Each structure stands twice: as structure tokens, then as C-alpha cells.
Image (tube, rainbow, N blue to C red):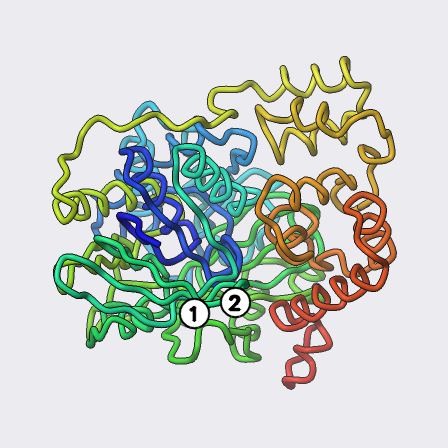
Amino acid sequence: MKVRVVVIGGGATGAGVFLALTRRGVETLLVEKRDLSSGTTSRSTRLIHGGIRYLENLDFGLVFEALRERAWVAETFPHLLRPLKIHIPLYRDGGRSPLIVGAGVKLYDLLAGRGKIAPSEVYLTPSSVPDEVEVKREGLKGLFTFTDYQILLPERMVLEGVRAGVALGGSYLSRSEVTGGEVRGDSVLLKIRTPAGMMDVEAEAVVVAAGPWGDGVRKLFGLGGRLIRPSKGTHLELPPIVERAYFVESGRDGRLFFILPFLGHTLVGTTDTEYTGVPDAVRPTAEEVEYLVEGLKKVLPGRRGDAPILGAFSGVRPLIDVPGREESRISRRHRVVVEEGRVVTVVGGKLTTWRKMGEDCVRKVLPILGERNSAPLSPHFPSAGVEREEVITLLKERYHLSGETAEVFFSLYGGEAEEVIREGGSDASLKSAVFAETGETPLNLVRAFTHEFAHTLGDAVLRRMLLGKTPGRGRRYRKEFVRILVSFLGMGEGEARDMVDEFEEEVRRTFPGPDDLLRQGESVK
């Protein structure tokens, strides 16, 4: 098989590169060894943000760029985003100056320009802090707010980017792993293990967009050295202990981490420490859990700070390798490196800037192909510019959906929601809520298989449905999963049960619950 470019990695970075190349008419093959967004993208804090904390590092250019990309994401994927006011409480035993933080939130507004979501707020005395703010008052010396976006399913943003690239002529292989490669003259030869067997591919260029796996992929092409500093981030999932979002200082080292309301529970994180293990095997440790619980108790009073842990998860960020610098001090900028003339690696970056990373990468790839950076084609993003209330009202009135079900279909599909419902046909059971935590329906699960590249139940639930973002991950719906797989996807009962078994094993392996944390010796109180 011959193509012009092979992109390795189906997370946010790979999707950005794939989209940027296909927009320019470049024949491109995207290869992912597991599923779209099954790595770092699915383990994020689920924010589309400018990175206000990078102002402390005087990285104004990065913040300005990220805020500009935040505005693009908001315009293109409005169904996936929710504005989120975030509160920064400062205490007397902390290391940050109220005047500097106050200036920082105002500068954040200024850098956002017309993309500003809501004005920041500054409360320089404890008595001026609104009563509804849930943090401890003892030792409080001020409070500051800024607004970013929470993204419900970053995996669906990646999915829409890949679908747009395929519509522009690109190809996508999942469950396929590059096992070898060689630059030979004006070509790159690759060996790819696919579910159907080994495949030989010849390309003019290869882009390594494999996140923390990037250096390992580079070795397949005989490239040495280290471009990536893997940094581990761990999050906790707790009951709904806050109604507002917070960005707070750790009492241990002064690092900032988030406490966020999310889908009926609370998301706390993240840590930021060097990771030397295999990215596939990353899991939370008792020490990381203790670090976050300690920070939580510092700012939340009484029973809020003593809430039980429902679950935890970890991911690995692919930071640019800067010897001698702590992970939390390394810029989240990205870098594009060309080696051996035809192997291009994207390093660093952040979820919010995935499109910009792709565009910057293409500027390095096109000269390798002997191409100019011509005016790109416009991809079709069906939710761009749609109005939430208009779509939800239409779904309720025309298709007699409940408000909750209409909200679910808009949140997942945006401007495609009506088309999805029409394609679901007249069977009302397909559109009736089955999954209580999120209000999702059998149709949402079925469509993941029929239209969204899902091959396993884990692909569908964990990376295409809101259910996969709840602490239980849908494990209590074994009977319902089997029924839907048999009734609507035509599987035999044995095959369906095997698929559910595989799903439960993936959840156990990836998302340790309270019992798993206790086995590590960690108290969850």
C-alpha cells in the first residue's frame, strides 16, 4: 500500500495533524494501535482553557495562543462545552500574592480579547467573598475568579476531527500498530500489524503524534535520544461535594490543582510528576491519592473534605524534554522536529491547541512532499455555530423527546442530533433513557458501533458516551449491554457476554475503584 503520509497516533495531536493534512488534499493514513483517544486525551482534566497558571512562568505567548484556540473550539464544538467559572482562594500560609493573582486574572481577560467568556472577579478581603463560595474561611485572604470551558467528552472532539478528515479523503486504521520502519531514499517503509494481518506501507513522510509513546515509536525508525519528558497526572473522583469549581494551592508544595463539579460527581486533580514507566501501565498510586486528599482537606471544610473516593485515573503528558527543570515548570508549548529528512515528531502541547499543533506540523511536512502550503479545504463540522436551545426545542417538539433526552442528544451530537434521531427509526425503545446516571439511550450505544469507529464496548462506553465518564463507568448495566448488543447489533448472546467481560476487564485495569486503592494501603477517608 502506498500513501503520501502516515500519521501514528489517534489522540488529539494525531487528529489535528490528520485533519490539517487532509484539508490540503494530502493522501493520509492515520494509524492507532488501540482506539481513538484511548491514551492521554481520555485522561485529562476535561477543560478547554488558556492555561492561566502559565502566566506565572511569563509564558504570555502560549496563553494568548491557547485562548485563541479556545475560542475556535467553542465556535466549532459548542455542544461539548459548558462555561465554567473557576474560583482561586488564597490563604495566609500560601505563597502567592493577592495583588499578583488579581493582576493575573485581569490579564487573562485582556489576552482573551473578544473570546472572553465572562469577566473575572477580584475579592481582596475575606469579608467581601460571596457567602455561597464553599471553601474554608479560616486564614482566607482573598478570592479571584476566571472563566474557562469544561468539555464533557474531549474524545468526541477528536472523533469529529477524524471523521472530517476521512470525509476529505483520509483513511483510518484502528487496532493497528506500527511494528517497524525504515527511511530508504525518498520513502519511508513501515510494517503495520492490523487485525487482518501484517501490512506493508510505503509513504513519503511519517508523523509521530503518539504522545508519551512518541520516543518509543521513534526508536522503530532507528532514532535515538529523548524528545519527550513523560509527566504523570492523577485525578480523583468523589461524590458531589462542590457546586462551584476551584483552582487551589497544595499545602505541600504550592502547586495548583482543580476541584471541579462534573457529571454529578467531583473531579479533583491533577498531579504533575515525572513518569518513567510504560504509558500503557499508568495507574494512580497511594502517594498521589494522599497528595490530592491532603490538598482537598486544606480548602474544603468538614465533611466536604472527608468525602469518600469513588475512583481514580491517571494519564501521561508528553512534555518537551527540558533537562533539569521540574515538570510543573516546563512549558506546555509544542515543538515539531524533523529527523532523517522524513520522520516528523510532534512533542508537547495541550488538548486545547490540538488544531494549532496540526497546522504547525503540516508546515514542516509539506516541504518534504514538495508541496506548497496552499489554501486549505474547509472541513464540515455540523455543530459549528448552532444554538443549543434551538436544537433542544426542535428535538422536543418534533420528536416528542423529554427535555433530558433532548439534552443528551444535543450534548453528544450537536448539529447532527436530528439526523441521528431520524436514522434511529420508529423504535421508541431505542430512544428511551436506559442509563440513569446520564440519561443516555440504547441508540447512543448502537451509533458508536455503526457510525463512530467503535469496535469494542469499551470504545463505545468509555470514549463516546457520557456514561464512561461517571465513576461507575456503567459496570452495573451488564444485562442492558448484552440486551442492546443482541437486539440492535445482531450479536449472539455468547459473543455479547464475552464483549461485556472484556469491557469490565478494561475498566478494572484502567480505573481503580476504592477497593483497589485500599489494596494499595491507602485510606479513602
Q: Name the residue under label 1.
A: 232
Quarter holding the N terminus? bottom left
Quarter holding the C terminus? bottom right
Please name the residue shown 50% across and 66% down the image. 197
Cα distance between the residues tagged 2 and 1: 7 Å
Please name the residue shown 39% across and 72% down the image. 273
Q: How many marks do you count on the picture?
A: 2
Residue placed most toward the observer, 441 or 146: 441
Q: Name the residue under label 2.
A: 314
In this view, which residue lies farthest toward the front?
A: 1
Q: Name the side, left or right, on which 280 lies relative to 483.
A: left
Is 382 situated above or below 445? above
Q: Name the side, left or right, on which 221 lies relative to 388.
A: left
Residue placed most toward the observer, 424 or 491: 491
Residue 210 placement: quadrant: bottom left
Residue 103 visible, this orientation: no
Please name the residue shown 64% across and 63% down the image. 305
Please name the residue shown 73% across and 59% down the image. 472
Image spot of residue 440 (x, y percent): 75, 40
Image spot of residue 116 (x, y percent): 38, 28
Comes first in the chain, label 2 or label 1? 1
| Amino acid bearing label 2 | Ser
Image spot of residue 228 (x, y percent): 28, 68
